[in-house]
Image (cartoon, rainbow, N blue to C red):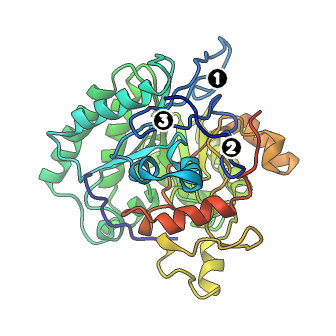
């Protein structure tokens, strides 16, 4: 489903027992920090990858950024009592912060370094820490990309920005979700591949780093009506052969089980083209009560814009926005309630469930919507999942 997305702006000891709405994030975190004041930082024990592990995101700590560049952080840091505990469910989750054209070329290197430093600090500067990031730098993009191609100056600026981003990442272990709303590359005028060519160059540069895993955004199962061909086309054009794989559902609310089935189809089609060994990640930030774009339209578009579809108001409500499976690399865990066939596909093909989407922001861009965030925490079917 084509969607518009406006630019984002530029952006002591434990004192309380954890309330029922705030639980350990399973799989990816072996900790649950609750801060006595806003200056404290999340901390986690170290973890190491097993030598035979083929998943670069697994068996390592996932860093948590603590700073105002993440719009969920300040509301959490300034909250008190039960509300603070509820907002921690979002603020303390390892997420993939968005970096885009609102960050000038001259500043992107510094911004990336600051973000990485904060994320590493959450694990005691363990060098094995995974830092998650989302790149949303293409210009023009979304509906504007359907009417004109990037100018020479825009293309040059894009590559300069990417070069500085790459230099700032260096040897950090990173998972990079590349260009949300990826299918807009397919609507370029005159069937141009200009956007995909730019992405392919960027992917090659990022994947040249020793510890970078790049996942190109391929849309969602409902965006493509479960047909793999459009996703395969945009992925091939954008250089998926050089990437770790792709990401699904960043800007949609479709179910995790449908993304797994759809992603498996895309992998199979890529293999037919000789592009083998690809894996994918699924965004689960928004789909605790999953629904498709078509179902949302038929229901009268509750919430107005699709970016800001109505949040759940009760745990029993269906087809509304609430937090999904917490970020984790344990994608085949029985706790997620996936059918056996999907669990098997997840174990083989899905590197992680990630939170790159930002449903706690108004229109998924800005500002932070406190009431919406609290509603999603209170209604998430995963809010009571114990650590394990």
387 vs 178: above or below = above
Quadrant in the rendering for residue 375: bottom right
* Position of residue 170 in the picture relative to residue 255 (left or right): left
* Position of residue 156 in the picture relative to residue 112 (left or right): left
244 or 266: nearer the viewer: 244
Q: Earlier in the sequence, mark 1 or mark 3?
A: 1
- The residue lying at 71 percent from left, 35 percent from top is 330
Q: Position of residue 268 (x, y in %)?
A: 68, 44
Mark 1 Cα within 10 Å, few/some/many (few <14, many 20+)?
many
Q: Earlier in the sequence, mark 1 or mark 2?
A: 2
Mark 3 Cα within 10 Å, few/some/many (few <14, many 20+)?
many
Q: Which residue is mark 2?
A: 23
Q: Which residue is mark 1?
A: 59
Image quarter hosting the C terminus? top right
In front of the other: label 1 or label 2?
2
Q: How far is the residue under mark 2 from the one under mark 3?
A: 16 Å
Q: Which residue is mark 3?
A: 64
Tag shown at residue 264? none
- The residue lying at 36 percent from left, 63 percent from top is 366
Instruction: Label 1, secondary structure: give it.
Output: loop
For residue 67, say whether it is visible: yes
């Amino acid at each position: 489903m084509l969607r518009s997305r406006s630019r984002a702006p530029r952006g002591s000891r434990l004192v309380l027992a954890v309330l029922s709405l705030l639980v350990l994030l399973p799989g990816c975190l072996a900790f649950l920090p609750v801060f006595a004041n806003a200056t404290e930082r999340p901390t986690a024990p170290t973890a190491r990858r097993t030598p035979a592990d083929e998943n670069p995101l697994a068996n390592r700590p996932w860093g948590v950024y603590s700073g105002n560049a993440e719009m969920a952080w300040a509301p959490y840091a300034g909250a008190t009592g039960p509300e603070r505990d509820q907002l921690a469910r979002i603020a303390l989750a390892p997420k993939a912060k968005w970096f885009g054209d609102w960050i000038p070329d001259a500043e992107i290197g510094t911004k990336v370094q600051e973000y990485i430093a904060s994320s590493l600090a959450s694990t005691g500067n363990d060098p094995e820490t995974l830092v998650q990031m989302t790149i949303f730098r293409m210009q023009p993009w979304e509906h504007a990309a359907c009417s004109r191609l990037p100018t020479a100056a825009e293309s040059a600026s894009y590559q300069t920005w990417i070069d500085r981003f790459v230099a700032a990442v260096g040897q950090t272990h990173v998972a990079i979700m590349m260009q949300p709303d990826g299918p807009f590359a397919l609507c370029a005028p005159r069937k141009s591949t200009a956007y995909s060519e730019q992405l392919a160059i960027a992917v090659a540069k990022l994947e040249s780093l020793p510890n970078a895993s790049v996942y190109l955004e391929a849309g969602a199962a409902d965006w493509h009506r479960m047909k793999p061909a459009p996703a395969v086309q945009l992925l091939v054009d954008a250089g998926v052969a050089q990437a770790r794989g792709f990401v699904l559902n960043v800007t949609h609310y479709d179910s995790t089980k449908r993304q797994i089935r759809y992603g498996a189809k895309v992998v199979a089609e890529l293999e037919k083209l000789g592009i083998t060994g690809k894996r994918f990640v699924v965004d689960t930030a928004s789909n605790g009560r999953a629904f498709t774009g078509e179902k949302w339209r038929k229901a009268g578009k509750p919430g107005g814009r699709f970016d800001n579809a109505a949040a759940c108001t009760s745990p029993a409500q269906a087809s509304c926005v609430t937090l999904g499976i917490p970020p984790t690399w344990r994608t085949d865990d029985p706790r997620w309630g996936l059918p056996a066939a999907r669990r098997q596909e997840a174990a083989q093909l899905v590197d992680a469930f990630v939170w790159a989407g930002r449903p706690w922001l108004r229109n998924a861009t800005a500002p932070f919507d406190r009431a919406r965030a609290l509603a999603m925490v209170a209604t998430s079917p995963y809010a009571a999942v114990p650590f394990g």
